[in-house]
Image: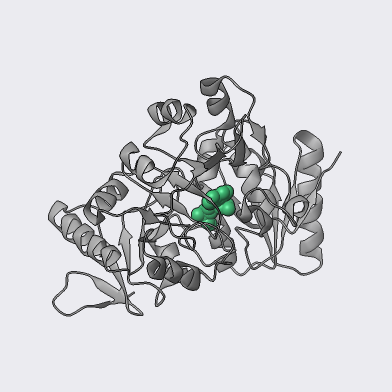
Amino acid sequence: MGVFEKGMPWTKVKGTALLAASGDPSQEEQAISYAADLLRRGELVAFPTETVYGLGADALNPAAVQKIFKAKERPPDNPLIVHVTGLEDLERLTENIPVEVALLAGRFWPGPLTVVLPKKDIVPAVTTAGLSSVALRIPAHPLTQKLLAAAGVPVAAPSANISGRPSPTTAAHVIEDMAGRIAAVLDGGACPVGVESTVLSLLSKPPVLLRPGGVTLEMLQELLGVQIIDISITGAEEFKDAPPSPGLKYRHYATRAPIYLVEGEGEAQKKQLLALGEGFAMQGRRVGMLICEETGILFPAAAVELLGSKKEPGLVAGRLYGALRRLDAAGVDVIVAEGFSEQDMGRAVMNRLRKAATKIIKPW
Ligand code: AMP
Ligand code: MG
């Protein structure tokens, strides 16, 4: 899709370097060192993590962080997650670290868990959108770790999509949204988890779940032995005036076509899915169905994205954003989506589907 840059082993798409970093080790090393150098110079680099592709900038360089907000068209009051390599970075960037952090770090880091802690002055206001707290994570993806180590700076990185769009889980998704807006994309293949990190605020006791993700509520409660307050399920409407996490008030993961989400389970849910699908088709609208494998047999003719079995919410999470982008690309007029149970990773899936939905239908 792109043109080769003179003297360089990679292509450029609208000026954005596409750095291949899977396969050949020497090519990977070259790609990482080029990307790390760009980050240190205050440029933007998108890179894979185990959750989704992040859009990175030096978190301690306000001018660099400012570029993230511009490239993503992100509202300036939505703070960023800072990615670091070790606990010593936590001490450098945060204060009043509660004892829970050691427990959480021992079990879930590196991994898809972000914690919110009081920030030190060294973290610029633009990175935290003016808040006195900062969100931090130690990612597990080997490429992310190598990039962070090579860059030698904490890296602020929201998902590498234009604000409001589904998060990218491949380099091609990043190029779709970001070509011409950022210096480079490190291509490390598809992201294994597929939805964003769990965000847990440790600013109060008990901790508050701000966003469900790869580390589930059940796992957190078992480790900490407390009931965690889950405010992530509640819709954006409730927090419009004073959201506990700024990101909660914005619509997310949106496709161009409106999404009708049918919650519940069993026969009532299936009937409602069929009725909506057929109803829209009879109006002459091109319908996209976003459903599980078990329901898939009901819709042989429609544009169907099968998310996997209802029994495997982890797989469903991994396929969700790619499926949303494919339905958009297929040019459907309306999407009918099936709701899932909220257990384990199902909680993260439903959180994303509800935020993406234009209308939520509860057939009971
Ligand atoms: P993104 O990186 O776009 O996936 O979004 C990061 C999420 O973390 C958003 O929902 C933010 O609102 C949330 N977040 C980041 N920093 C903080 C903070 N200091 N306090 C509360 N939420 C935060
Ligand atoms: Mg995002």
Instruction: Name which residue lies at 20% across and 55% down.
Output: 28
> Residue 46 location, x and y as percent?
37, 62
> Residue 232 location, x and y as percent?
66, 43
> Residue 284 location, x and y as percent?
77, 70
Instruction: Name which residue lies at 31% across and 49% down.
Output: 144
Q: Say if 90 sits above or below 163 in the image.
A: above
| Colouring scheme applied when the structure was drawn | one colour
- As rendered, which of 335 and 350 lies closer to the eye? 350
- Horizontal side of 57 relative to 19 (left or right) equals right
Q: Quadrant of the N terminus?
A: bottom left
Q: Quadrant of the C terminus?
A: top right
Q: What is the count of numbered marks?
A: 0
Q: Say if 312 sits above or below 28 in the image.
A: above
- Horizontal side of 135 relative to 232 (left or right) equals left
> Residue 19 location, x and y as percent?
26, 64
- As rendered, which of 100 and 140 lies closer to the eye? 100
Residue 323 visible somewhere in the drawing: yes
- Furthest toward the right, the residue is 364
Instruction: Name which residue lies at 29% across and 55% down.
Output: 153
Q: Say if 151 sits above or below 119 in the image.
A: below
- As rendered, which of 238 and 132 lies closer to the eye? 132
- Horizontal side of 237 relative to 169 (left or right) equals right
Q: Quadrant of residue 178?
A: bottom left
Residue 291 visible somewhere in the drawing: no
Q: Say if 31 sits above or below 274 in the image.
A: below
Q: Quadrant of residue 3?
A: bottom left
Instruction: Name which residue lies at 25% across and 53% down.
Output: 152
